[in-house]
Amino acid sequence: MIKSLWPTSTPRSVVASGTNFPDALAHGPYAMPMHLVRPSSIHAAVANDIRRIDPARIDVVGGTGSVSNGVVTQLKKL
């Protein structure tokens, strides 16, 4: 994430698997922050950046094999 692109809040963000790159590539052209997660966890730096930009909506791309329901639950708490 390049902080200069989204220095403050944003209305929308995308979360995709960092281990299953086609999902992230498919959504790369959209002009919104994208955060990469592991299938079953969110790195602390990613969680901190999501809190920093405080998106009103987070779109999760890929199925539960790419981003688990547990990660979605964690994202809702952010």
Image (spheres, rainbow, N blue to C red):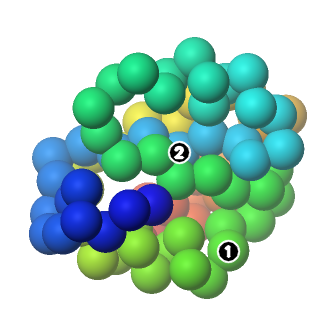
* Residue at point 41%, 21% (across, down): 29
Across and down, in percent, residue 62 comes to: 67, 26
Question: Observer-nearest residue: 41 or 29?
Answer: 29
On screen, residue 54 versus residue 68, left or right, reads left
Question: What amino acid is at disc 1?
Answer: His
Query: Label for residue 43?
Result: 1
Across and down, in percent, residue 50 comes to: 39, 67
On screen, residue 64 versus residue 24, left or right, reads right
Across and down, in percent, residue 7 comes to: 18, 69
Is disc 2 placed on a helix, strand or loop?
strand
* Residue at point 41%, 73% (across, down): 49
Location of residue 25 (image quadrant): top right
Vertical arrangement, residue 53 with respect to residue 57, above or below: below
* Residue at point 29%, 77% (across, down): 52
Do we see residue 76 in this rendering?
Answer: yes
- Is there CB contact under 8 Å for labels 2 and 1? no
- Residue on which the image places disc 2: 15
Outermost residue, top side? 26
Question: Observer-nearest residue: 48 or 65?
Answer: 48
Is disc 1 placed on a helix, strand or loop?
loop
Question: What amino acid is at disc 2?
Answer: Val
